[in-house]
Amino acid sequence: MKIEDKEKYFKDKKLISIVLCSRERLQLTKQLIHSIETKTKNLDLINVTVLIDFDDYESIDYYSNYGDKTNICFKLIIRQRTHELCKGGINLCYKICDPAYFYWPLNNDTKIITENWDEILFEKTVNVLKEFNGNKKYMYIHIDDDTHVPHYHERKGNCFPICSTTIGNIFNGCVPEEILHWGYDAALNGITDWVSRHPDIGHTMIILDLIKDIKIQHTTYYIRNKDGTSSENKNENDENQRLRDHIDLRVHDFTHELGKFNKSGYDQLKYCELFISDNE
């Protein structure tokens, strides 16, 4: 990235905000933070906002020390634990992030694989960055989210998409606030896909496929099969997988008892109409 590019595009905002809700899994957390530090070429063009629970003492100690040492623009939120993992998690992080063109929600069971991923992101999007502050534009970016399912992202969306903050500003967060926890990726994909196909505003939504350019590793309990189904990991020998922990169980219980949405429900049309009104 040239110096003049930084001066032109990044006077008032960063390239991207990394949003991270983190609890326990400290070794995996350290792997993610290390990957951000070592795989990012321009650390001055990113910011990292982390949310942890008030009773997660190991994480509090780790991030408190990390915040004193890192050169990255770093913010830490400590909150009371909640079952509203989106509204009280990644959406809360989004609201206190410094201004940026893009946001990227990650979990502490992911890590970035691609060297200089930020440089790639800039080069692939520089032609439209200037339009985010002028003519209304939205961008939804697929990355290799490590689902191991061919063409999954084309049908169901991306588990860890990079999105323009023009999308986040409509949600007032990373995702619609009615979503409690699991399922936000599919809902987000449904909205952006609807907008992209709308006869009047479809031209404003750019769907960019970078699965061959930017890759993460997702060390998950759930393994995606080639046919698109999911199976449960019973083997801890694979370094890319892990066994179920109590966090997985807790979210599973939330989903079973409370559903995926809060009592006010979720109306995709409501958010589609917000995109329409945003362009009037």
Image: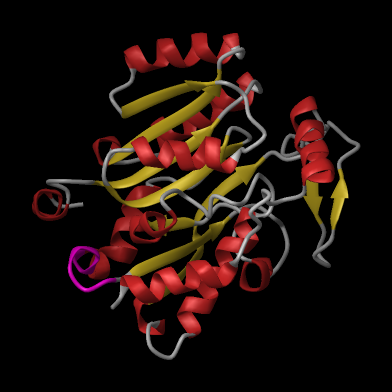
Q: Quadrant of residue 180 in the image?
A: top right
Residue situated furthest front in the rendering: 264
**Residue 203 horizontal/vertical position (percent):** 36, 83
- Is the C terminus in the top left, top right, bottom left or bottom right quadrant? bottom left
Could you tell me residue 78's position as x and y percent?
48, 20
Q: Residue at x 54, y 75 (%)?
A: 193
Q: Is residue 132 magenta?
A: yes
**215 displayed left or right of 38:** right
Q: Residue at x 49, y 67 (%)?
A: 271
Image coords of residue 119 (percent x, y): 31, 52
The quadrant in which residue 31 appears is top right
Magenta includes 105?
no
- Give the residues in magenta: 130-136
Residue 46's place in the image compared with 26, above or below, is below
Q: Is residue 135 above or below residue 186?
A: below
Q: Quadrant of residue 189?
A: bottom right
30, above or below 108, in the image: above
Residue 40 visible: yes
Q: Nearer the viewer, residue 165 or 36?
A: 165
- Whether residue 112 is visible, yes or no, is no
Residue furthest to the bottom in view is 199
Q: Position of residue 40 (x, y in %)?
A: 37, 40
- The residue positioned 67% from the left and 67% from the top of the image is 156
- Name the residue rendered at 43%, 36% in the picture: 93
Q: Is residue 42 left or right of residue 147?
A: left
